[in-house]
Structures are given as C-alpha cells and as structure tokens.
Amino acid sequence: MDVELPLIAVVALVGYFGIRLYRPPTWLLVVLLLGGYLLADTFLAPAIDGGLTNVTTD
C-alpha cells in the first residue's frame, strides 16, 4: 500500500508540530520565512532547487 502526500503537506505538518512543540520566538519565524522568501529570488535559487531535487529523487 503506497501513500502519496504532496511535499507542501509534509512541510506544513512538520512546521505545525515544530511550532507547537518547540515554541520558537515569533521574530525567529519571521526572519526565517522572510529570509527564505528573499533568498528564492537570488542567484542561489538554482543551487537550492538543485539540492532539493537531488534529495527528493531516489
């Protein structure tokens, strides 16, 4: 039996339980989210995308 979940669902679950269990400060969440958003529009975006592709493929 195979179960398929979209990556965004897995990320959302990990994020939800991470926030509930570890209770990071709000400023840290804002910095990480804003930093990731801004980093996605730089020259490093292809390297990040390539790294994620290598991790998620078998």
Image: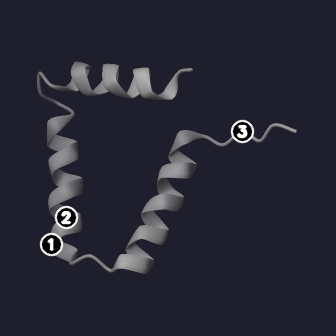
Residue shown at 21%/76% (left/top)? 26
Q: Which residue is mark 1?
A: 27
From the top left corner, tell me how far across and down residue 53 is, in percent: 42, 22
Mark found first going from the N terminus, 3 or 2: 3
Amino acid residing under circle 3: Glu
Mark found first going from the N terminus, 3 or 1: 3
Q: Tag 3, which secondary structure?
A: loop
When asked about the image quadrant of residue 51, the answer is top left
Residue shown at 17%/30% (left/top)? 41
Residue shown at 24%/19% (left/top)? 46
Q: Which residue is mark 2?
A: 30
Label 2 crowd bin: few (<14), some (14–19), many (20+), radius 10 Å: few
Mark 1 and mark 2 in contact (Cβ < 8 Å)? Answer: yes
Q: Which residue is the extreme one toward the front?
A: 58
Q: Tag 1, which secondary structure?
A: helix
Q: Is 35 above or below relative to 40?
A: below
Viewer-proximal residue among 35 and 20: 20
